[in-house]
Image (cartoon, helix red, strand yellow):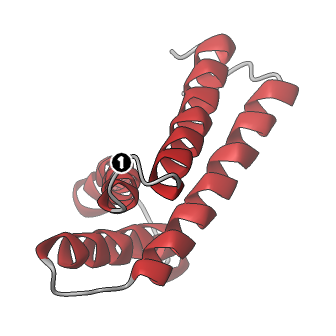
Amino acid sequence: MVSDSTLRVLAWAAVLIQGLACAAVLRHRAPWALVVVLNLLAATAVLAYWGRRWFGYLFRGVAWSATDQLIPLYALLVSVLAVLTLMGRFRGVAVQWGIFGFNTLVLLAAALFFSFFRMNRLF
């Protein structure tokens, strides 16, 4: 079981990492591929989280609807675009920055949520 304080620390650490990466890339102290790698890491984490649910859908008879798959579909799209960008097959700098900004907003919302709302049982 994960405690409230652990969730808060992890959420704010993720926001801090996003902010530091953004500052480093914008100040030209790091290659912009760092943004792509962070996008890929975030998307991979989402897909890993959903892997457990997919197992339940396939082998435990859990009912699901197609709308349940929108978040992992987004994560899969981000993963594919990130891999193509890292391979040099897709040059979507603006797309990667847009994904990075969206991820940062989601992480900030999660950090604020975990900071201001007490959780008794999450997992």
Q: Residue at x 19, y 79 (%)?
A: 84
Taking the image as drawn, is residue 95 in sight? yes
Residue corresponding to mark 1: 45
Looking at the rendering, which quadrant does residue 19 occupy? Answer: top right
Q: Front-most of 118 and 116? A: 116
Q: Residue at x 22, y 56 (%)?
A: 59
Circle 1: residue type: Ala
Location of the C terminus (image quadrant) = top right
Q: Front-most of 122 and 73? A: 73
Residue 98 appears at what percent x and percent y? 56, 74
Residue 121 appears at what percent x and percent y? 66, 22
Q: Is residue 41 above or below residue 117?
A: below
Q: Is residue 77 above or below residue 39?
A: below
Residue 12 appears at what percent x and percent y? 64, 29
Looking at the rendering, which quadrant does residue 58 occupy? Answer: bottom left
Taking the image as drawn, is residue 68 in sight? no
Q: Residue at x 82, y 22 (%)?
A: 118
Q: Is residue 41 above or below residue 98?
A: above
Left or right of 95, for residue 104: right
Q: Is residue 28 above or below residue 115?
A: below
Left or right of 109, for residue 53: left
Q: Secondary structure at mark 1?
A: helix
Q: Residue furthest right?
A: 116
Left or right of 109, for residue 90: left
